[in-house]
Amino acid sequence: MKLLRVGTVGAERPALLDEDGVLRDLSGMVPDIDGVLLSDEDALDRVRAVAAAEALPVLESAGLRIGPPVGRIGKIVCIGLNYHDHATETGAAIPEEPIVFMKAPDTVVGPDDAVLVPRGSVKTDWEVELAIVIGRTARYLESAEAALGYVAGYAVAHDVSEREFQIERGGQWDKGKNCETFNPLGPWLVTADEVPDPQDLRLRLSVNGEIKQDGTTADQIFPVGEVVRYLSQFMTLYPGDVINTGTPAGVALGHPEPKPYLRAGDVVELEIDGLGRQRQELKDA
């Protein structure tokens, strides 16, 4: 299923995109697309059955804002340097264990909402990423194969980063990762049954119409199942938690000088096979 949330900021309602591309209203069946729903297989099966029968009301999509596909996110866990080609372009050694950092849930915006360039920023960068959405409480998982059973679905994430804040201002990466609007998510949460191989997805990103990133999840250093298994050794993952799994080569940081960092007025478009597209215009904060 392709699950999404539509409407104005803070007042989104649950919806579903059916197999014919028709937007349908889920608000009569479930209160939201969140961890409560994603952990309830019976509720998800009822949604599947009603969707297959095309019994859900149709929503007029024209002019309707798409919000983040997951509401009430508990935490966002991110993996850094998780593509071989990205590590190479930045001159970093291949990590022996996943590099882990966090983003606050309040960085999440809709897939087509504006991204704000922070005040004083000169190095705002782009990063297309595959996002994992957790569907079952996970702790101390024993294998990567078992860990895949804890995934509710996948989505497109844009892990926007401010490199000066992240790298040059001391401390941890958090300052460059948690600026307002720095995690567009969506348009859809695509349930795991519709993504048979998360290591066979193509990711693309363009800036002002010029392709900057064109990679594949096959190049991940730590694949999806291993990322979930590894994180479960250090923290409990709850339904509705989101994991950003890293970005392929092509970020501004990896370009020669002068590096083409983002400015107000730039337009970033990104997509992942089967998971949908995003489009954001950069604006000054």
Image (cartoon, rainbow, N blue to C red):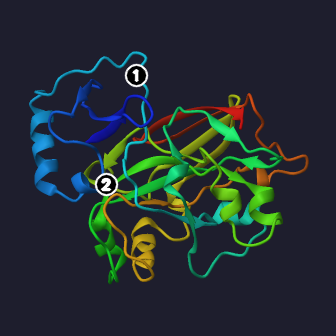
Q: Amino acid at mark 1?
A: Leu
Q: Residue at x 39, y 15 (%)?
A: 62
The quarter of the rendered structure image containing the C terminus is top right
Residue placed most toward the observer, 199 or 62? 62
Q: Nearer the viewer, mark 1 or mark 2?
A: 1
Q: Residue at x 30, y 39 (%)?
A: 2
The x and y percentages for residue 114 are: 60, 33
- Tell me if residue 45 comes above or below residue 29 in the rendering: below
Q: Quadrant of residue 253?
A: bottom right
Mark 1 or mark 2: which comes first in sequence?
1
Identify the disc placed on residue 64: 1
- Tell me if residue 186 comes above or below residue 162 in the rendering: above
The x and y percentages for residue 188 are: 38, 40
Q: How many other residues sit within 10 Å of disc 2, few (<14), some (14-19) or many (≥20)?
A: few
Q: How many other residues sit within 10 Å of disc 1, few (<14), some (14-19) or many (≥20)?
A: few
The x and y percentages for residue 199 are: 44, 59
- Tell me if residue 278 comes above or below residue 272 in the rendering: above
> Which residue is the extreme one toward the front?
10
- Pointer 2 residue: 196
In this rendering, position of residue 90 left or right of residue 205: right
Q: Amino acid at mark 2?
A: Pro
Describe the element under mark 1 as helix, strand or loop. loop
Identify the disc placed on residue 252: none
In this rendering, position of residue 67 left or right of residue 255: left
Q: Residue at x 33, y 67 (%)?
A: 238
